[in-house]
Amino acid sequence: MQPKPQRTHPSAVHLVLAAHMDDESLGLGAWISAWNNRRESVHVAFFTQGEPRNSGFFAHGDQAELYAARRRTEAILAGRSLGIPLRQLHFGGFPDLELARHLDPAWIWIMRLIQSLQPTSVYAPAYEGGHPDHDSINFLASHLSDRPGRRRIWEYPLYTQANGRVLYRSFNRSQGLELVFPSRASDRRRKRRALSCYLSQRSTLQYFPAAEERIRALPRHDYSRPPVEPTVYELWGWPWKSKELCALWSRFHPARG
């Protein structure tokens, strides 16, 4: 049975947490377009500068500074396509692929945004074992539920794996009601325009189908264990093991405030 669309208050403020420039358009582009059509406020927080220390992860042969600048410009253009003004795009500048080693400053940055924007809804990449930065943001978002303020915390899927096959924009297992957004044709067009701005990521974005967008209330994940085994980043030979991430999360204690 298709769930009814969520009714939102006219003063709704949506804060989308994105590890990288393009996560917001991939996971929630049509939804963002619809929120802006309803004149609801949308902010996007990009945690990393999109520039891994290892240039082998660059989609182009740019030098590090040029690559980071390219991705930032693309995010600004994509935001414009979705109706998000520059003042509502926030850039954290943390090292790509290394967010788990910067949990304390990343948490302080999130809390400053929360206190400044007072969002009614927060959206984080799903805990799905796709990218270590996505999972680290999900872990940090899980600590928002016991903070003062009335807000709902959601997660949105990007990519995971099942039986060794990568799945795009699908949750890896059922954990509560999923809200499915079929979107209007105009919202889909705005999403496609936004994604077309990310020229540096074209080779990666081609694998993501133009399917329905899904969100669900953030479940109570067990962050002492990886969400899938092996994770996608382990399958792809990235410089992380899921046990390393779980160990870093276990030692994190969020600052009060």
Image (tube, rainbow, N blue to C red):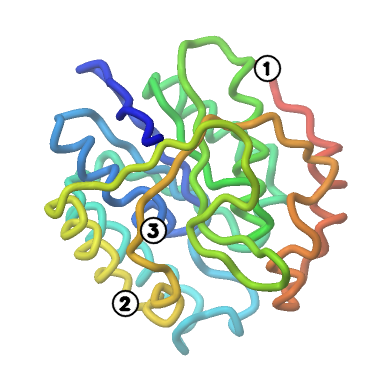
| Observer-nearest of 111 and 66 | 111
Residue on which disc 2 sits: 199
Residue beneath the point at 72% across and 74% down = 238
Image coordinates of residue 168 in percent, x first then y, are 51, 63
Q: Secondary structure at mark 1?
A: loop
3D distance between C-alphas at marks 1 and 3? 32 Å
Tell which tag, 3 or 2, sits nearer the viewer: 3
Image quadrant where residue 249 sits = top right
Closer to the N terminus: mark 1 or mark 3? 3
Q: Give the crowd class for mark 3: few <14, some 14-19, many >=20 residues within 10 Å.
A: many
Q: Give the crowd class for mark 2: few <14, some 14-19, many >=20 residues within 10 Å.
A: some
| Observer-nearest of 60 and 210 | 210
Q: Is mark 2 in CB contact (under 8 Å) with mark 1?
A: no
What label sits on residue 26 in the rendered view? 3
Residue beneath the point at 13% across and 37% down = 37
3D distance between C-alphas at marks 3 and 2? 14 Å
Q: Secondary structure at mark 2?
A: helix
Looking at the figure, which quarter contains the N terminus?
top left
> Count the marks: how many?
3
Looking at the figure, which quarter contains the C terminus?
top right
Closer to the N terminus: mark 3 or mark 2? 3
Image quadrant where residue 205 sits = bottom left
Residue beneath the point at 78% across and 37% down = 222
Q: Is residue 241 left or right of residue 5?
A: right
Q: Is mark 3 in CB contact (under 8 Å) with mark 2?
A: no
Image coordinates of residue 35 in percent, x first then y, are 23, 35
Residue on which disc 1 sits: 256
Residue beneath the point at 18% across and 56% down = 190
3D distance between C-alphas at marks 2 and 1? 40 Å
Q: Give the crowd class for mark 1: few <14, some 14-19, many >=20 residues within 10 Å.
A: few
Q: Secondary structure at mark 3?
A: helix
Tell which tag, 1 or 3, sits nearer the viewer: 3
